[in-house]
Amino acid sequence: MNGSGNRQKSVLFAARSATALHRLLDVAPVFAGDNRIGRRRFTLVPGSDFGVDALAAIEAADARTVPWAEALRQPYDLIVAASPKGDLDLLTGPLALLPHGAGFNKSLAWEGSADSASGLDPAWLLRDGRPLADLHGLAHPGQVARLAAGCPAAAARASVVGDPVLDRMLASLPRRDAYRASLGTGDRRLIALTSTWGPESLLERRPDLPTELAEHLDCDAYQLALIVHPNEHSRTGSYDLRQALSPALASGLLLPRPYEEWASVLVAADGVITDHGSTALYAAALGIPMAAGCDGGSELIPGTPMAELLSRVTVLDTAADLEPALAAHSPQAVRALAAPAFAEQGRALDRLRTELYALLAIAPPTAAISARPLPPPAPAPSTPTAFAVQTEIHGAEIRIERRPAPAELPAHHLAVELERATAPLSQSAALLFRRRTRPDRTAPHSVTWTAAGWTAHTLADHPGRRTAAVELSGSRWLLRRAQTPLLTVRVEGSSDEGTVVRTDPAAVLSGVHAWLTDNPYPDNPQPGAPVTLHCEVAGRTYRAHLAPAADDEAAHEL
């Protein structure tokens, strides 16, 4: 119980947008397990164009909401907000104000004072000359100094508490391999593009960049993700956003959700291409190499942590410049660029609990508190259905590069996943393959292809010098060509320092198809003896063993 008798305390989380709401959800655990807190309620502060997704996020968290009009009618023991905008001064109770991003890097001329950083603007932090908040929780002493220069009255109530979002990312680093496994990244380099919102964002200034990268990078060497600001999700809507990005999404681009998943994808990333949004500061704090997709334009405030970061990284002009740009900085140098934005790393919830319970006028719980690791991201929804494949053959050694089709670069052949590709691409393909399906149960009445039957049917429907292949298991495929015995192809993983690396076996099949086109099987002194090919995919070599198919393999039910 508390010092006020048996009355339990009430906490109101006041969110104006999805961005602010997500920050509040990351702060809420400071009250977890404390039965002295009787009510934890959320309300939507009116006046934002981005409020719709905030309500959806509250519902997804199974939290209780109160309408704004009702929130105004009753006092609360504590109000927590992550934006000073809106009529927060009409609420009754001590107010704790937290940032909803990192670094206070932007000045938005159409909101508040043109020369003040959004979030540090006296136009929003003062009401009738008095400080709006009882506590300003900031992430770094430098932010307190900036606040003191522009709004001394608000700075008098400031405290450095760290950044709970960064702490969740840091706590999640041991789970990086699990996140990459969930995304199906494998040995590929995961490159995250990050776009803030507004007219100077990456998506507004270089809308074709995600598609350009998806179409020009070897899809067995790279995986791409696009992290879009929650305001842009709210403004555009998920449907319209996916329609606008459909070419890149069809090429395998990941589009993580704007709460938690974006952060787990960032933890899994190997490189970042950014604009002036604060997501890049989180990436830098994790030591992730980065390049700039565009500059900060008129919104970016000179001398801020984000401005300094952009001034040090290479601007990416074309997809071919990606690797040199990312290689220009060591992880230690990148982390140093984020240091002015984050202090108290690993201690944010502990510091916040101390400050928030002081406003509640009760002692904080004595049990240790730590940041929750992020949940794993959702698996990649799909892979490309068609690939433009380049090959180089030197004896039994084949180098393979694949790009999503159609591609502008010259190709040796087109390979398609027959049951997912469009008819025009299938009619043009030289390699037609089918991946294994895993139905939950077999229907009482069914018709099922055998591996031999499906490959024969596929070649009959697509005559010419083609190859049909079907997956029997993760590493075994059955392959059919005209004037060639029915073959099985067994693909070995590539061993590397205690790990086994596997690539998409369809890439290896493209190498086998190219080799068989020039080398009718068998070409060795012993007809029917196995043949081993060495297929180089994204710099690694995978052995493919070709042998005549056994009867049970030909009869394998798909």
Image (cartoon, rainbow, N blue to C red):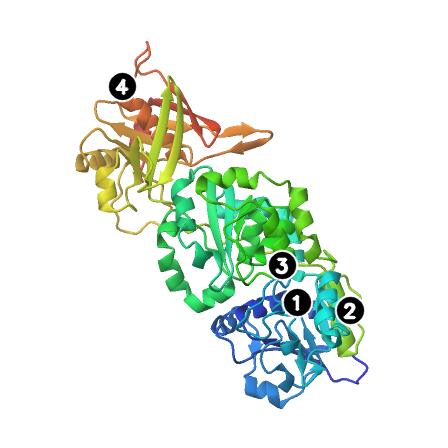
Residue 12 on image: x %, y %? 64, 78
Residue 11 on image: x %, y %? 67, 78
Residue at which label 4 appears: 520
The amino acid pointed to by label 3 is Pro
Residue at which label 1 appears: 27
Q: Nearer the viewer, residue 354 or 555?
A: 354
Residue at image location 66% in from the left, 52% down from the top: 338
Q: Nearer the viewer, mark 1 or mark 4?
A: 1
Label 3 sits on a secondary structure element that is loop
Characterize the local packing of mark 4: few (<14), some (14-19) or many (20 or more) Cα atoms within 10 angstroms. Answer: few
Residue at which label 3 appears: 302
Residue at image location 37% in from the left, 63% down from the top: 240
Question: Contact, CB < 8 Å: mark 3 with mark 1?
Answer: no
C-alpha distance separating marks 3 and 1: 30 Å
Q: Nearer the viewer, mark 4 or mark 2?
A: 2
Q: Which residue ends up furthest to the top in the rendered image?
A: 525
Residue 77 got which mark? Answer: none
Characterize the local packing of mark 3: few (<14), some (14-19) or many (20 or more) Cα atoms within 10 angstroms. Answer: some
Please tell me how many numbered marks the rendered image carries: 4
